[in-house]
Image: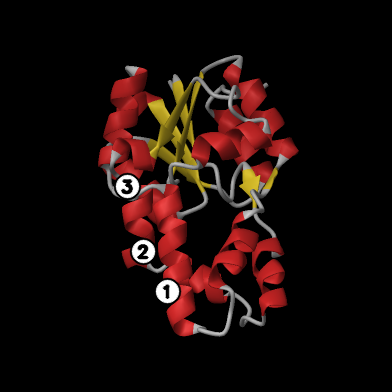
Amino acid sequence: MIKTLFIDLDGVLRIWGAEQDTCTEQFGLPHGAIRQIAFAPERLLPAITGHISDDEWRTSIAEHLHRQFPDVDAVQAVQAWSKPIGTVDHAMLEVVRNCRQHTRILLITNATSRLPSDLDQLGLSDEFDYIINSSSVGAAKPDTRIFTAALHIASATANETLFIDDSAGHVAAAIEIGLKGHIYQDIHKVRQVLQNHGLLE
């Protein structure tokens, strides 16, 4: 029996469009240039494991961008890229709210120290029983330590916990330590899975 639900943020509850890449094209940058710099593993991992702050991460992006495109106002470009916070998938949020009537909900996300601000602006701060931010825990999915930490925080057992994420690798890591897992593809399939586990009416 599932007693605890772990759920991912980006790609499940929060949806990103093309607004970040589009807004930087006004600076004469190639499409996706800042994203490529920002999400390079050597730059992103320290930010989502808490070794550097969100501000430090974005400063490092601007510094690298300036080296690569010296004629571009790198600071302004990164500021523009940083403004969007995505949008909430309200249909999926309603599913979470329904499930929360029957079980505890933990948000587990790879995020920088900006996460609390994003959740406040998105209106999601109070939608979960616990929020597990990789940069606070010091381990990012698929590192199984983030799941172990979440289980400890929630006083939950792995075999009574279901994890939903849009990354197959993240789900595989959770299953490896005994959690049930579902790779999020669309809301219809996730509703069926939750109904099968008795978490959704």
User: Vertically, is 61 above or below 167?
Assistant: below
Classify residue 34 as left or right of residue 49: right
Pointer 3 residue = 49
Classify residue 182 as left or right of residue 189: left
Q: Nearer the viewer, mark 2 or mark 1?
A: 1
Question: How busy is the neighbourhood of tag 2: few (under 14 within 10 Å), some, or many (20 plus)?
Answer: some
Q: Tell me the element at label 2.
A: helix
Instruction: Verify CB contact (< 8 Å) between mark 3 and mark 1.
Output: no
Q: Tell me the element at label 3.
A: loop
Visible residue check, residue 141? no
How far from the left and from the top, in percent, is residue 85?
Answer: 64, 48
Given the image, on which type of amino acid does mark 2 rest?
Answer: Arg
How far from the left and from the top, in percent, is residue 1?
Answer: 43, 20
Please tell me which of labels 3 and 1 falls first in the chain.
3
Q: Residue at x 67, y 77 (%)?
A: 27
Q: Nearer the viewer, mark 3 or mark 1?
A: 1
Classify residue 168 as left or right of residue 34: left
Given the image, on which type of amino acid does mark 3 rest?
Answer: Thr
Pointer 1 residue = 64
Which numbered marker is on residue 43?
2
Given the image, on which type of amino acid does mark 1 rest?
Answer: His
How far is mark 2 from mark 1, CA to CA?
A: 10 Å
How far from the left and from the top, in percent, is residue 123?
Answer: 67, 30
How far is mark 3 from mark 2, CA to CA?
A: 11 Å
User: Vertically, is 134 above or below 99?
Assistant: below
User: Vertically, is 21 above or below 164?
Assistant: below
